[in-house]
């Protein structure tokens, strides 16, 4: 089992910045990736950014150039630096950790942290 604890959400004005953190604990073997997803009311959860164990990162088009994901494998922590925030970035942001199993990838979720960007 893996536990994820997120922090860093809050209220910020458009153009501002926030940094989300996600600390993982528990059975931390065979970790494949860590990432961030977002969800707004009535919509499905969607990928914001993901970083793989080798360091390769992938971003959703709507955050490229503004958000940066980083990871400390030794500390089992992933961060999402969000700059130039826009009102449309308002959402609940969820940390996700992908672990390799015999059945394939298994994903764990954090509890979510609210990000609200005011205009």
Image: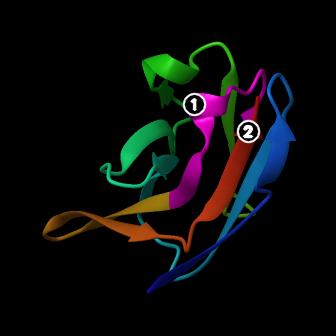
Q: Is residue 84 above or below residue 108?
A: above
Q: Residue furthest left?
A: 103
Residue at image mark 1? 88
| Residue for point 45% across, 50% down | 40
| Residue for point 76% across, 56% down | 9
| Residue for point 68% across, 29% down | 68
The reply to whether the magenta stretch includes residue 24 is no
Q: Residue furthest top?
A: 65
Label 1 close to label 2 by CB (< 8 Å): yes
The reply to whether the magenta stretch includes residue 85 is yes
Q: Nearer the viewer, residue 28 or 119?
A: 119
Residue at image mark 2? 117
Label 2: state its secondary structure.
strand
Q: Nearer the viewer, residue 35 or 29?
A: 35
Q: Is residue 53 left or right of residue 82?
A: left
Q: Which residues are magenta?
A: 78-95
């Amino acid at each position: 089992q893996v536990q994820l604890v997120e922090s860093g959400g809050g209220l910020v004005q458009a153009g501002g910045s926030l940094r989300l953190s996600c600390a993982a604990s528990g059975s931390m073997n065979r970790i494949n990736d860590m990432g961030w997803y977002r969800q707004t009311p009535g919509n499905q959860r969607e990928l914001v950014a993901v970083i793989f164990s080798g360091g390769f990162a992938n971003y959703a088009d709507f955050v490229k150039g503004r958000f940066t994901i980083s990871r400390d494998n030794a500390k089992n922590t992933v961060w999402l630096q969000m700059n130039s925030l826009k009102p449309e970035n308002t959402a609940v942001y969820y940390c996700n950790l992908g672990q390799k199993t015999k059945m394939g990838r298994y994903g764990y979720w954090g509890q979510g942290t609210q990000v609200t960007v005011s205009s």
